[in-house]
Amino acid sequence: MKTLKKQRRIQLIVVASIALAAATGLVGYAMRDGINYFRSPSQIAESPPHPGERFRIGGLVETGTLVRGQGKTVTFEVTDGGANIPVSYTGVLPDLFEEGQGMVGTGYYVDGVFAATEILAKHDETYMPKEVIDALKAQGTYKETDS
């Protein structure tokens, strides 16, 4: 009788382990499109991402590079002080978007141009995303502001 109980217990543990592994695999599979890695312009210049890889880029909008095309198409360059990456975006920019300010964009790197599907801008005069601050500090171009 004890052998049968022990055998059932082992079977239950094996089935539970398989179910846990399958659930973990399904969660990872479901989240694969929702995970967007952040890259600075210098990281993109050093090792360009794979074609079709969706990621986020952040930095400062380079002064003098903002060009509004026909319709809602806008091009500009984003920099972290070490490298500039051209960005193309079709859509309505946030109201606070301007040259010399921090931004984060989500999209794809296509033929040397970051094709943004979403652009986020700072939400007040002192805010900058943590990833952008870290990238600018790594390049030595970040200046602390007194708040």
Image (cartoon, helix red, strand yellow):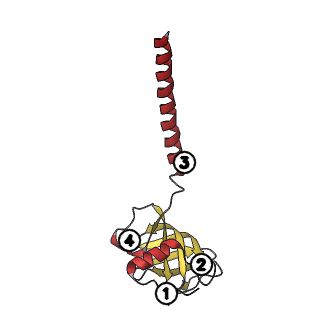
Q: Amino acid at mark 2?
A: Lys
Disc 3: CA contacts within 10 A as few (<14), some (14-19) or many (>=20): few
Badge 1 amino acid: Thr
Foreground mark, 3 or 1, reads 3
- Is the residue 63 above or below the residue 43 in the image? below
Q: Where is residue 65? Give x, y as percent.
A: 49, 87
Q: Residue extending furthest top?
A: 1
Q: Which residue is mark 4?
A: 43
Which of the two discs, 4 and 1, sits closer to the camera?
A: 4
For marks 4 and 1 on the same chain, the one whose residue lies earlier in the sequence:
4
> Residue 96 at x, y = what percent?
63, 82
Q: Which mark is residue 122?
A: 2
The amino acid pointed to by label 4 is: Gln
Q: Provide the residue designation for mark 1.
A: 65
Q: Which residue is mark 3?
A: 30
| C-beta proximity under 8 Å, tags 4 and 2 | no
Residue plotted at (34% across, 68% down): 47
* 41 up-or-down from 4: above or below: below
